[in-house]
Amino acid sequence: MKKTCQKCGKEAVIFISHQGRWLCEKHFKTYFFQKLEKTIKHYKLLSKKDKIFLAVSGGKDSMSLWEALFHIGYNPIGYYIKLGLGPHEEDIIETISQFAEERGLTFRIFDFPKTYGKTVPEIAYKKNRRVCSVCGLVKRYHFNYLATKEGFDVVVTGHNLDDEITSIAIDNIRWEIKELGRKDGPLMEEWHDKFAKRAKPFALFTDEEIKLFADTMGIEYYERTCPFHGEHSTRLDLKRVFGEMDRLHPGFKVQYYKNFLKVKHVFEPYLEELPLKECKVCEMPTRIGICAFCRLIDKTKEV
Ligand SMILES: [Zn+2]
Ligand SMILES: [Zn+2]
């Protein structure tokens, strides 16, 4: 039997599990924009006056976030950190450039290999580290570095509900209490003048909702996964488990996330963090003498 939209009776395209209702394409879009505005307001993520740094990867989440924010009256600047990952990176940049050009949006690239004379995989091999962990460190550092240096008010990323609950669940299963204490919710306030405020406006949106949004809005995005990033099987299995639980108990995923946000403060005292200092080389905040990024690229004061 065909499912019908609970608003207008037309053919439904999606089941919104936490609301227990089916929606057609038109009413799904309305729901999507309203939910985004509500999330931004509820968690005080953004204001219309903010200069917004949008970390764009070319994938469906960041591209959809760009489109959706633009649609409801925000004007983020898309920033891509070029890492030197190989020819597929040119395709990603091409996809993003085209997207931005068609909509008249501002798109910037930070060229890591050009700036430091080495690609991220080269550094990873030299340091005997996984490319993904180096890539994560380089990106996090530069989002913050560029945002504070260029006067942005906030950094937004496309993390969605499925990403968030999976990474919480992994630390939950392993009882990594410190890691649970380190987790941030949809908003991470600026708590040091060299730490930009961070926001995840899609934190309550499922993978399925964002995928459908991208498809109905005709957003071209880069679909292939990174050749260096085989998604860990535990993560994939957990995503399936969450999907099954959400099917059996509609709203399970959102509840799991919101309940975590309520108890998160319980884990924070276990962090035992050292006081914040300025990195001796780059002057960005760190808890040790020289920050993780400067140690990674062997940057010293003389350079
Ligand atoms: Zn409808
Ligand atoms: Zn540093």
Image (tube, helix red, strand yellow):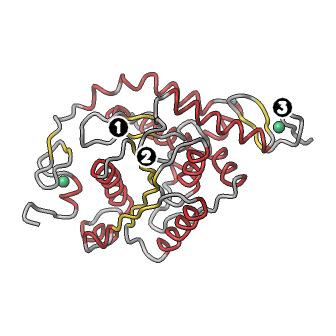
Quarter of the picture containing the N terminus is: top right
Residue at 83% of width from left, 31% of height from top?
7
x and y percentages locating residue 135 in the rendered image: 36, 60
Q: Are marks 1 and 2 in contact (CB under 8 Å)?
A: no
Residue marked by disc 3: 6
Amino acid residing under circle 1: Glu
Looking at the image, residue 143 lies above or below residue 302? above
Q: Amino acid at mark 2?
A: Ile
Task: Specify which label sits upstream in the sequence, 1 or 2.
Answer: 2
Classify mark 2: residues with Cα within 10 Å, few (<14), some (14-19) or many (20+): many
Residue 214 locus on image (x, y percent):
66, 53
Vertical placement of 48 versus 106: above or below? above
Residue sticking out furthest to the bottom: 87
Picture coordinates of residue 258, whole percent (x, y): 52, 27
Question: Which dot, 2 or 3, sits closer to the camera?
Answer: 2
Element type at marker 3? loop
Q: Which mark is residue 179?
A: 1
15 relative to 106 in the view: left or right: right
Dot 1 and dot 3 residues touching (CB under 8 Å): no
Mark 2: secondary structure: strand
Quarter holding the C terminus is bottom left
Disc 3: residue Cβ within 8 A of ligand 1's nearest atom: yes
Q: Nearer the viewer, mark 1 or mark 2?
A: 2
The picture quadrant where one finds residue 11 is top right
Measured along the vertical axis of the image, is residue 45 above or below residue 55? above
Indicate which label's residue lies in the foreground, 1 or 3: 3
> Which residue matches tag 2?
52
Tell which quarter ligand 2 is in: bottom left
Q: Which residue type carries mark 3?
A: Gln
